[in-house]
Image: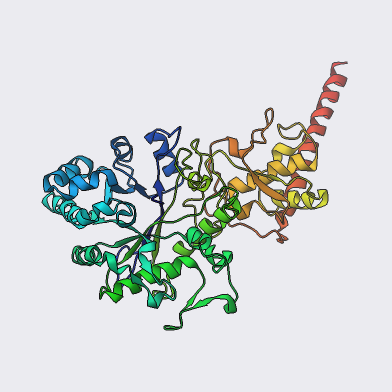
Amino acid sequence: MALHFLMLLLVVSVVSAEDEPFIGVNIGTDLSDMPHPTQVVALLKAQKIQHVRLFDADQAMLIALAKTGIEVVVTVPNDELLAIGQSNSTAANWVSHNVVAHYPATNITAICVGSEVLTTLPNAAKVLVNAIKYIHSALVASNLDRQVKVSTPLSSSIILDSFPPSQAFFNRSLNSVLVPMLDFLQSSGSYLMLNVYPYYDYMQSNGVIPLDYALFKPLPPNKEAVDSNTLLHYTNVFDAMVDAAYFAMAFLNYTNIPVVVTESGWPSKGDSNEPDATVDNANTYNSNLIKHVLNKTGTPKHPGIAVSTYMYELYNEDTKAGPLSEKNWGLFDSNGEPIYILRLTGSGATLANDTSNSTFCIAKDGADPKMLQAALDWACGPGKVECSLLLQGQPCSEPDNVVAHANYAFDSYYHKMGKTPDSCDFNGVATISSTDPSHGSCIFPGSLGKNGTLANFTAPSMNSTNSDSSAYNLQKCELRIRNLLMVLGIILCTVVLL
């Protein structure tokens, strides 16, 4: 059973690829209600996702991706591999139909030739390198070999003795395929694609691997794993596996091939024997992985070197075979609703998996009324939220209670700040919800279809004592004075008429 994760490890100096790290996603299609390609692309645009990997070369999807600028990795499916590996002309036809016909309108940047062929389709192993070379030759003939790289995703299980990483080596029974493959990758300037599964490494370790180590959670120094040969300290499974791949290649005297971790993620739901496939763990792993990539942390062997990541995956695939966890790796359901909201404070807007009109910031159930009032006053004061709609006679004045008013103020601030998770906290009395709290003529910012982010807006601290803190009360007083003057005007008019 092929499992899917996608990541690009970009290395400068000895191992060189892109200058800046990025986050992308895999797009699987084993859904009972697969969204139309135009809907998929709309979601990608809304999430500012600029890099995707397809598990095929679906024509409708390639057409939908045209003129978007999104960088696309296409795949030769395993069931087409034998034919392509035995026929140069078949490979040329595949490239002509699936790459040349769409490029450059569709920004195809790489081709995966099969997926985990050495471990899931061993009968095709003997033609795998030929298939890679034939596909590359077709690109050369079309003058696209510099723009489009060719490689094949490998399972991390082919790396033996993976810890400590410095002792890692590839399964020697595969060397007859791996050596000519690495020769090709090196000579063509391509990269090793590797599927890394911290979830499965953790599950199969029988308690040897701590959960926190698999999830990128901070570890005290005495809990870090130390490579006794290099004295490098490892704080997570992912880095250890990536470095194991580098050491395994070095064992075969290949030291300048970048690693592409072709898939990575964590399931949000599992069977009874998969207790750690939870929403919270999936959120923790994916959020930490994204921050690890975008912060340019690198690995202990290559610190500070950009690691670009294609996450597994965009959608939950409900028709996929296997255990329950296999159906629940997605960031979104088929309707484009987030399975959970990634915690990405300080990591930019890319892949917040927070759809444009589907989340709101509201008061937590049971929150202390005094704390709510304090947070409400802050939002309408130093928080610079426009709270006039909460005043008497305005659309959001009713119901006239602190919870209803806090809901509106919290959500306004949340959208004003671009819906970052940390903008919906308010000292712990707020929470993100997918239920629209709008009512009657009181329409919340999240229902307006607007981003709400203000240019050049600096977020004040909840502890701010900014003089604007009285703005909300001043607005209340101003409206009450206006109402009073209106009433006085009516009385005077009545007296004159009498």
Query: Could you say where residue 418 lies in the image, as x and y percent from the top left?
Result: 55, 49
| Closer to the camera in the image, 237 or 369 | 237
Percent x, y for residue 336?
Answer: 50, 38
Name the image quarter holding the C terminus.
top right
Give the quadrant of residue 255. bottom left
Q: Horizontal placement of 2 versus 444: left or right? A: left
Q: Is residue 138 left or right of residue 213?
A: left
- Residue ID at (74%, 48%): 376
409 lies above or below 219? above
The answer to whether 106 appears left or right of 195 in the picture is: left
Q: Residue 180 occupies which quadrant of the picture?
A: bottom left
Q: Is residue 119 above or below residue 234?
A: above
Q: Which residue is located at x 30 percent, y 41 percent?
A: 67
**Residue under the point 67% across and 28% down:** 441
Total marks shown come to 0
Residue 62 showing in the rendered view: yes
Residue found 56% across the figure and 58% down from its top: 284
Please state which of residues 63 and 269 is positioned toward the viewer in this rendering.
269
